[in-house]
Amino acid sequence: MTKATSRILVPVKGQPDDDEAVRLACVMAKRHKAKIYVVYVIEVPRALPLNADLPEELHQAELALDRAEQVADEFNCEIEAELLQARFAGPAIADEAVDKGIDLIIVGIPYRTRLGDFHLGSTATYVLKNAGCRIWLCRDAIGKQETS
């Protein structure tokens, strides 16, 4: 690793692959004395204002952020958890990385297929193409695959 890692961002979405991404962030944070930021992005449909009250989505976000805190506690790590509302998660994550001066984004992704081929998903693809820092993908094993 050539550049020091002092700020790590982990986007979560309430899926099992989030846990592994948070665990990896904790290991890295302990090694480099880095700060961990965990973010959940509620994607707001265009028909609604960005600050729309979305109680079901808010509940899911709170569960995901609580779970990330539980995983971090297992490593005796502190995280700063944040909830964002945006039209699309990818740009919100990339912007958050810039705003917080992030050195590394760790993205947990499931192994999923679409039309028979591995499918990365639009959020991870956007972050890979547009974030200005290093990005690690933490993909689930093939045996845990989803289809979409």
Image (cartoon, rainbow, N blue to C red):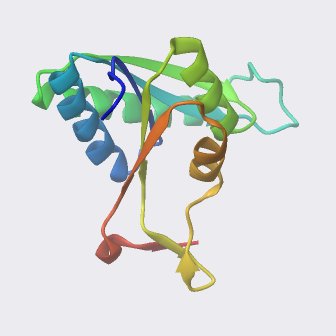
Task: Give the residue drawn at x 48%, y 27%.
Answer: 39
x then y, percent, for residue 7: 38, 19
Q: Is 115 located above or below residue 55 in the figure?
A: below
Most extreme residue toward the bottom is 116
| Quadrant (top left/top right/bottom left/bottom right) for the C terminus | bottom right
Q: Is residue 54 visible?
A: no
- Name which quarter of the figure residue 115 lies in: bottom right
| Quadrant (top left/top right/bottom left/bottom right) for the N terminus | top left
x then y, percent, for residue 135: 46, 41
Most extreme residue toward the front is 2
- Name which quarter of the figure residue 49 lies in: top right
* Nearer the observer, 39 or 131: 131
x then y, percent, for residue 88: 71, 38
x then y, percent, for residue 27: 18, 33
* Nearer the observer, 24 or 146: 24
Q: Is 19 located above or below residue 3 in the figure?
A: below
Task: Give the residue drawn at x 50%, y 31%.
Answer: 40
Q: In this view, does 5 lie to the left or right of 133?
A: left
